Image: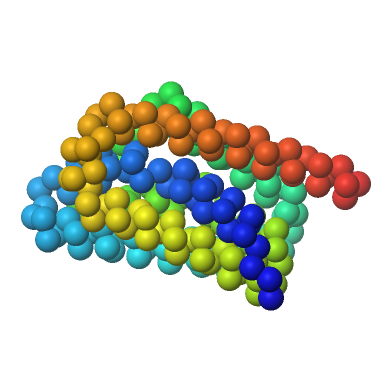
């Protein structure tokens, strides 16, 4: 088993910009506005755990799902790239919609854990990352990248108040725009890989 450093870094950066912890801060603080400090910390812990579990589940069994649905990896790459591009455009233009808070729903699970953190983009990215290094090495590499990213997300949520006071509103917006720019480039590369995969297969 060989640890793939390039795959680790690519996966970690991709997941980080998709989840966009700086962009999550105002949403997280808004949804937990009426919480005590201890309740807010527990909400951050639970949201991070839920997101990790959902993304890890699809990273492990995503290939089996694709095989069952008879969907090829290049098709997943193109569709995943389009999806990431839409998310990137929302980050760049600032058109992301605030989630609707429903009564009797734990905000740490919905909408924070999923779909904000463990959304379609993060799920697609993790599934595609595993395909790049089949076998135990791929699972371990992607798993470590996911652990690192979710730990960073947990830190952002745990110290949300302090981080926002440092970044201020302008810094938070700037961080989201930079994340959108990086994600758009990743999305374009993902779609290009998928198109070349289609050509090679035929």
From this view, report whether residue 92 is shown above or below residue 161.
above
The mark tally for this picture is 0
From this view, report whether residue 143 is shown above or below residue 86.
below
Residue 14: x and y, percent?
Answer: 53, 47
> Is 47 left, or right, of 91 in this rendering?
left
> Is 165 left, or right, of 156 in this rendering?
left
Residue 52: x and y, percent?
Answer: 42, 63
Front-lying residue, 121 or 133 = 133
Residue sitting at x 46%, y 48% = 16
Q: In which quarter of the image is residue 91?
A: top left
Front-lying residue, 57 or 91 = 91
Q: In which quarter of the image is the N terminus?
A: bottom right
Residue sitting at x 42%, y 29% = 177
Q: Can residue 109 be seen in this view?
A: no
> Is 70 left, or right, of 110 in this rendering?
right
Residue 89: x and y, percent?
Answer: 50, 29
Residue 115: x and y, percent?
Answer: 40, 50
Residue sitting at x 58%, y 58% = 8
From this view, report whether residue 169 is shown above or below residue 126.
above
Residue sitting at x 70%, y 58% = 132
Q: Can residue 6 be seen in this view?
A: yes
């Amino acid at each position: 088993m060989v640890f793939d450093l390039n795959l680790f870094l690519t996966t970690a950066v991709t997941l980080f910009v998709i989840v966009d912890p700086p962009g999550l801060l105002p949403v997280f603080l808004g949804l937990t506005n009426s919480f005590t400090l201890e309740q807010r910390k527990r909400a951050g812990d639970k949201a991070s755990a839920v997101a990790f579990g959902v993304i890890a589940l699809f990273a492990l069994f995503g290939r089996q799902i694709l095989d069952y649905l008879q969907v090829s990896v290049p098709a997943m790459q193109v569709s995943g790239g389009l999806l990431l591009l839409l998310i990137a455009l929302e980050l760049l233009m600032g058109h992301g919609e605030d989630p609707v808070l429903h009564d009797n729903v734990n905000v740490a699970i919905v909408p924070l854990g999923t779909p904000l953190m463990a959304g379609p983009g993060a799920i697609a990215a993790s599934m595609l990352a595993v395909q790049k290094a089949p076998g135990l090495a791929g699972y371990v590499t992607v798993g470590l990248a996911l652990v690192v990213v979710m730990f960073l997300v947990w830190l952002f949520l745990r110290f949300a108040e302090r981080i926002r006071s440092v970044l201020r509103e302008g810094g938070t917006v700037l961080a989201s725009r930079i994340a959108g720019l990086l994600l758009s480039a990743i999305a374009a590369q993902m779609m290009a890989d998928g198109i070349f995969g289609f050509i090679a297969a035929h």
